[in-house]
Image (spheres, coloured by chain):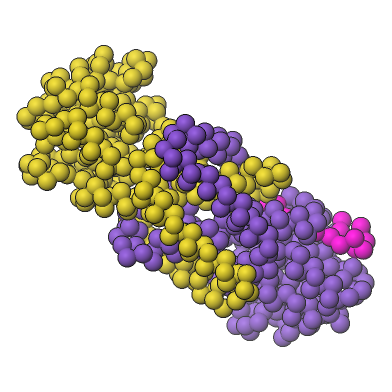
Chain colours: A yellow, B purple
Amino acid sequence: MFQQLGVIGCGLMGGSFALALKRQGLVKRVVGYSKSPSTTERAKRMGIIDVAAESALLAVAGSDLVLIAVPVSATETTLRAMRNLVEPGMLVMDVGSTKRDVVDAARRVLKERVVHFVPAHPIAGKEASGIDHADAGLYAGRQVILTPLAQTPPELVQRATDVWAAIGAQVLKMSPENHDAAFAAVSHLPHLLAFAYFSAVARQPAGRDFLSLAGPGFRDFTRIAASDPAVWRDILLANREEVIRQAQRFRHTLDAFEHVMRSGNAEALEDLIRSASEARAQWQMNQRR
Amino acid sequence: MFQQLGVIGCGLMGGSFALALKRQGLVKRVVGYSKSPSTTERAKRMGIIDVAAESALLAVAGSDLVLIAVPVSATETTLRAMRNLVEPGMLVMDVGSTKRDVVDAARRVLKERVVHFVPAHPIAGKEASGIDHADAGLYAGRQVILTPLAQTPPELVQRATDVWAAIGAQVLKMSPENHDAAFAAVSHLPHLLAFAYFSAVARQPAGRDFLSLAGPGFRDFTRIAASDPAVWRDILLANREEVIRQAQRFRHTLDAFEHVMRSGNAEALEDLIRSASEARAQWQMNQRR
């Protein structure tokens, strides 16, 4: 049970976390801050936060749990604004989709107080963002990756684990490096490919006609191309080395497919497709809903 | 109203066409043939066909409407097996996903009888294939592309249009060349990219671990990677020139994204993403369901 949750960034992720903790009776009071005062006010009117703070620092004051739920590129500024009130007994987490850059920023800004920070990445979201879509069930059945630092006390990592588990998430721990490599492969590269593919089709002379013929396969393949530009700019830049490494692997595999297509080798092409097709048919999303 | 429909290939597409025509009372009798006798028998037991034919030729005998619903690579052999019974008063269609190769094969095999052939590509399907998944509503609200030949009598093209419209499809006409260029862009390339992407992720050393972390975005992006290997081998080979041309466009766009990522140009990256994201958010599938 926490006395006070301070939410910095009252959007989909922060708002849903606050609602989930309230629903489980895990927190007495929620103080929220957003860059836009109207968002903070709206969160208060919706009952998602109890108190609207006028700064990130004021949202942290008196909180024993702090969730930083701002775009990845704003994490360092946020940490800087709040660092003087990060103190013993406080658990600070984020929700960023990349972890090496966040850990680096936290070390740089928080210095010895970084022991209070447990980096978190909940694999949850919706196509729609913003406080209006906050949902107490957003994290239920979803995976949350924690990338704790070596110097963080085990009790604090356990508290972080417990709070996510209490709102229904499945908690995994890994290093920031492994996290970023894995998500470059299964999330960041697909987004990059979907953005590039959609642009390539739409921008050609007959693009408009072509798009009018597209069916359900296209619809699903390109769904993530509609993702938020500012969020994905930050992710693709923060994790660009791993993403470009994964893009290289992808290009080599695409080369192999094109090579057998050009040579007309039907058997080899079918083997390549079958290997992907069978593996994809067997794959199941690890999340429970 | 047709006296007899001959269905060659009693799978999802052929079976659904037969069911749809029966439901609309558009056909008196359905004769079916499949390469595997057990499939033909099953189609008969399920009431999808009325008579099981022992050859493609016997399915064509006496039919005024013939649907060739076999894999693209089997189209030429099928045409060859039935050509002697293609005669005036008969409308022959296929359901292949590529059209230039089918038209070439039809000209080669049917010679002057090619006037009875109206090439068709219904943009419909399911992940599950086979007669067991045949569905009278499969084509309702879907687009069907016809690529009629110049020498085909307009009345026959009209009959083809009418029968698809009668089972709820929206009929479009275009040249085989335009068809193949459009579907290379919006269907064949996405399949190629999804196959290559899934293989690239799955085959790397940590692939299994990575796949266990993948979420809903990955699930949708890779759904088409589970498509049937033999069907897609045929499509990617039959339309390889257009597909490779589209792959080149895609690679150039991917180059542009990677270039701004490497140079750390956040503004340019956001612009590229926004252009794709906004266009995708506005796009709506032209099909009615």
Q: Is residue A277 visible?
A: yes
Which residue is found at the position 39% from the left and 28% from the top? A130
Q: Is residue A194 magenta?
A: no
Quadrant housing residue A266: bottom right
Q: Position of residue A92 (x, y in %)?
A: 17, 32
Please provide percent x and percent y for residue B131. Answer: 60, 71
The residue most toward the front is B263
Q: Quadrant of residue A281?
A: bottom left
Q: Quadrant of residue B33?
A: bottom right
Q: Nearer the viewer, residue B165 or A12?
A: A12
In the image, the segment drawn in magenta is: B141-158
| Residue A30 vertical placement versus B47 (above, below) | above
Residue B234 coordinates in the image, percent (x, y): 64, 71
Residue B127 appears in the figure? no
Is B36 placed left or right of A287 in the picture?
right
Rendered location of residue B58, percent (x, y): 78, 83
Q: Nearer the viewer, residue A249 or B143?
A: A249
User: Residue at the location (33% across, 57% down)?
Assistant: B210
Q: Residue at x 53, y 44 (%)?
A: B256
**Residue at x 25% of width, y 16% of height:** A55
B209 lies above or below A76? below
